[in-house]
Image: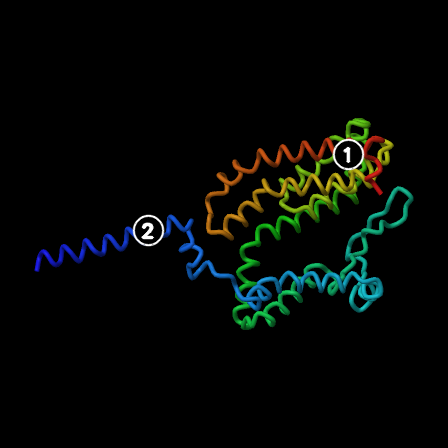
Amino acid sequence: GGADGEDDRAGRHRVDDSATTGAARSGGNSYAAREDDRRDPPAQIARAYAPYLIIIAIFSIASLGPIKAALAKEPWTVVFAWPGLHVTGANGKPLSSVNFTFGWLPAAGTLMILAGILTAIVLRVSAGQAVRAYRDTYWTLRHAIVTVMAVLALAYVMNQSGQTNTLGEFLATAGGFFVFLSSILGWIGVAVTGSDTSANALFGALQVQTATKAGLDPVLLAAANSSGGVLGKMISPQNLAIAAAAVGMSGKEGDIFRRVVGWSVVLLLVMCVLVTLQGTPVLDWMVP
């Protein structure tokens, strides 16, 4: 009986060895035949792309000329004077920024919510699951939301108090060299605030005013501020925290930062050189 058992085990080993050898000879064909390596059916692929297609469709429709013009009017967009805010410019007239434009329907956030609702319907996500997903998302982004709100408020204060003009006067003394520095300003803004929107609100007007006073192209510097800001996204603490939490790597933000900061700086330098060349006859044809 013992000999028979040993023979059976030896036979199984020979079968296993031959199977392994056959798989190796076939170049891993057995791996390609694994259950989880099969191609997904077209319906599943379409469902996976559905959220992105819905977003593209909604924003494309909202950007169409007649529709965009209609959404910019009441009742979809409401303009009102902010209560208690009385600020005048150097000419003694009220600043246009004292009026708040509340575009509740054409706002990007509203369009994203509509896209989310349509996506839930297409993917057959229940109302309870959708509400929980929104709740968890807002909770994860709570610090980033407060940061963006605070920076936008700071931008309004700086613009209306004349601080932006003062900084513009100072930075204009750098002359043509400011073209090289403009991307760095946007990079710093996003690295600190975590939002390109916030950095544009904070430094966008500063870039344009500095360009005007220094005899530079305002369009180029405004674009440089936004482009440099994009390169600061990867090292922003808020974005690192959100990315780490999304993939279950909370607490590893420092490790991620060390891996990407070098690439961020290198890409920033490339952007600075590109913007500088766009400010010269070499590449000025790229600026509209």
- Residue at the spot 18% in from the left edge and 55% down from the top edge: 9
Residue highlighted by disc 2: 20
Q: Secondary structure at mark 1?
A: helix
Q: Is 154 or 12 nearer to us in this picture?
A: 12
Q: Is 16 or 228 nearer to us in this picture?
A: 16
Identify which amino acid the numbered label 1 is placed on: Leu
The picture places residue 11, in percent across and down from the top left corner, at 21, 56
Identify which amino acid the numbered label 2 is placed on: Thr
In the image, taking residue 229 as reference, residue 177 lies left or right, namely: right
Image height of 44 relative to 221, above or below: below
Q: Is 279 or 178 nearer to us in this picture?
A: 279
The picture places residue 196, in percent across and down from the top left corner, at 68, 46
Q: Residues within 10 Å of mark 2 (few under 14, many from 20)?
A: some
In the image, taking residue 61 as reference, residue 216 lies left or right, namely: right
- Residue at the spot 59% in from the left edge and 42% down from the top edge: 234
The picture places residue 150, in percent across and down from the top left corner, at 66, 48
Residue highlighted by disc 1: 167
The picture places residue 257, in percent across and down from the top left corner, at 53, 38
